[in-house]
Image (tube, rainbow, N blue to C red):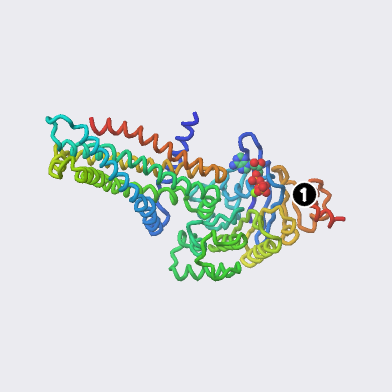
């Protein structure tokens, strides 16, 4: 479980995270939704320490992450997998080297053992025979899957996904969503997914947090989200032609 | 104010660069890759420019000797002095600042804007050390070798020009090369080279690492890397010449 307590973040005099408190459950896909610019990425990067918060506490299973230095954080970092908004594959390496990278850095396994692990996670994300391809040779959906494979290579306890299906067609994004949900349940990971895609919300949103202008505005499940009378949330959920027609 | 802020950031970055690499084996592999891309890949241009510059210095000197009191061996002497003292260490370092500096800044800058650096950090890898340290070590080791090659090529270029034009004989040229030779000048040249190599690799690494934004900013970072490394090379050249030759 990850807990955020009263997080505040300013960029200059812009208050981007306003007193955000929330907890993320183990074995569940915890969704963070909100409009573009509402602060989802800043929130996620704050949780993993890529952005330092100005005030507040972040606890990883009771361990206070905010007060740790780089060396102490390293232990927790090795339990974290993260899927970035743009995949962030290392473009000087091929698929196999990308996925193997954390294993090379932090384990003393033999090459064969590492290769076995790499092939296992690649297979888990339904990729086979792509080991030697370079990043530019992959489609957007394949990149996301390689990035997921790399994120889970070290058996993480915590998985962060920033817009895992941005830029993908509805069908492929559905596949990615299901994949994330399955992996989360299979390995009992605490997973956090940023999204503004209502399809994802309705398919994997067990535990949803809605961020509005930097504030945590609403929390609930995917079923509750359709019943709510919270105005800002309604505007967000039924903001598109398709969803507003569905409501009627 | 802005300048002090940048220097502060540079110092803070260097504190993260100068740490022990996570895995020695991976560091060694990176080092060999950098030898290739910083060293071997620059060899062609270094050889080309050095031969021609040596030739030009020789021809200029030869044509300007019109008094019979000045021996023709003056040509060899002039080529040697200018190549070893200034041309190879300073001018070639400036060329490398352009070639290598822009490559380092754009490579690291691209990794920054595509979140690859964040990906390293999230794994617990010290990205500053992982990305900049091997480049710096490689430059410190390989640039002196490039500069020594450049010295030989400059002297060779001068000789070729004299032989081909028939202005000075091989005998005169070579005896000029030997006049008053001091080993200290080589030390002076290599000491400068090492400082310049440090400037090129870390200043370019800094501008790449601190890139914010997108492709446009990567281009700007790469330009800044070349401009600031060149300015610093020129400034330090003056300072080091004062310190080492007085
Ligand atoms: N490094 C930064 N410096 C200054 N402001 C920033 C920085 N990063 C983010 N912001 C600001 O913080 C706010 C929240 O941005 P954030 O990237 O978290 O949005 P988001 O919800 O992830 O949007 P999207 O769905 O488009 O990815 C925005 O107004 C943005 O301009
Ligand atoms: Mg975002």
Question: Local crowd at mark 1 within 10 Å, few (<14), some, or many (≥20)?
Answer: some
Residue extending furthest toward the right: A248
Which residue is at 42% across, 44% downward?
B101
Q: Is residue B192 above or below residue A96?
A: above
The chain ID associated with circle 1 is: A
Which residue is at 72% across, 59% downward?
A200
Left or right of B167? Residue B200 is right
Instruction: Give x and y (percent) for residue B214.
Output: 57, 45
Instruction: Give x and y (percent) for residue B87.
Output: 29, 39
Which of the two residues, A67 or A74, is positioned nearer the viewer here?
A: A74
Residue A54 visible from this viewpoint: no
**Which picture quadrant has residue A6?**
top right
Q: Which residue is mark 1?
A: A236
Tag count: 1
Which of the two residues, B210 or A191, is positioned nearer the viewer here?
A: B210
Ligand 1 falls in quadrant: top right
Q: Is residue B141 above or below residue A164?
A: above
Which element type, helix, strand or loop, lies under badge 1? helix
Q: Is residue A212 above or below residue A106?
A: above
Q: Is residue B203 above or below residue A202?
A: above
Left or right of B22? Residue B170 is left
Residue extending furthest toward the front: B165
Instruction: Give x and y (percent) for residue B120.
Output: 51, 53
Instruction: Give x and y (percent) for residue B116.
Output: 53, 52
Left or right of A215? Residue B102 is left
């Amino acid at each position: 479980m990850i807990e955020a307590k009263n997080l505040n973040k300013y960029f200059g005099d812009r208050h981007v995270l306003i007193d955000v408190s929330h907890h993320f459950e183990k074995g569940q896909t915890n969704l963070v939704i909100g409009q573009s610019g509402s602060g989802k990425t800043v929130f996620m990067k704050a949780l993993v320490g890529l952005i330092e918060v100005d005030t507040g506490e972040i606890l990883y299973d009771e361990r206070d992450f905010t007060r740790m230095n780089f060396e102490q954080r390293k232990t927790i970092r090795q339990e974290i997998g993260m899927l970035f908004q743009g995949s962030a594959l290392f473009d000087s390496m091929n698929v196999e080297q990308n996925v193997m990278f954390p294993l090379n850095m932090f384990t003393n396994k033999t090459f064969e053992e590492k290769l076995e692990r790499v092939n296992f996670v690649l297979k888990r994300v339904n990729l086979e025979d792509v080991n030697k391809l370079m990043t530019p040779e992959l489609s957007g959906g394949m990149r996301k899957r390689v990035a997921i494979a790399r994120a889970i290579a070290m058996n993480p306890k915590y998985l962060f996904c920033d817009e895992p299906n941005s830029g993908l067609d509805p069908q492929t994004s559905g596949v990615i969503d299901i994949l994330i949900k399955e992996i989360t349940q299979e390995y009992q990971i605490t997973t956090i997914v940023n999204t503004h895609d209502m399809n994802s919300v309705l398919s994997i949103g067990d535990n949803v947090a809605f961020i509005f202008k930097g504030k945590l505005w609403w929390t609930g499940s995917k079923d509750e989200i359709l019943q709510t009378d919270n105005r800002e949330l309604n505007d967000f959920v039924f903001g598109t032609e398709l969803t507003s027609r569905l409501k009627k | 104010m802005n300048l002090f802020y940048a220097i502060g950031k540079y110092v803070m970055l260097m504190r993260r660069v100068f740490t022990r690499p996570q895995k020695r084996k991976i560091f060694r592999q990176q080092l060999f890759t950098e030898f290739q891309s910083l060293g071997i890949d620059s060899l062609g241009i270094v050889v080309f420019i050095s031969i021609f510059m040596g030739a030009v210095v020789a021809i200029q000197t030869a044509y300007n000797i019109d008094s019979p009191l000045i021996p023709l061996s003056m040509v060899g002497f002039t080529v040697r002095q200018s190549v070893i003292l200034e041309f190879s260490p300073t001018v070639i370092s400036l060329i490398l600042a352009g070639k290598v500096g822009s490559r380092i800044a754009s490579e690291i800058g691209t990794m920054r804007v595509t979140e690859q650096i964040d990906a390293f950090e999230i794994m617990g890898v010290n990205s500053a050390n992982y990305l900049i340290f091997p480049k710096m070590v490689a430059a410190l080791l390989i640039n002196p070798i490039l500069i020594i090659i450049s010295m030989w090529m400059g002297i060779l270029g001068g000789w070729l020009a004299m032989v081909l034009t028939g202005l000075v004989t091989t005998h005169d040229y070579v005896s000029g090369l030997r006049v008053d030779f001091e080993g200290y000048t080589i030390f002076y040249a290599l000491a400068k080279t090492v400082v310049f190599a440090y400037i090129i690799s870390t200043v370019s690494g800094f501008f790449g690492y601190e890139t914010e934004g997108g492709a446009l900013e990567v281009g700007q970072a790469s330009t800044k890397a070349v401009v600031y490394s060149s300015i610093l090379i020129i400034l330090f050249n003056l300072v080091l010449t004062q310190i080492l030759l007085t």
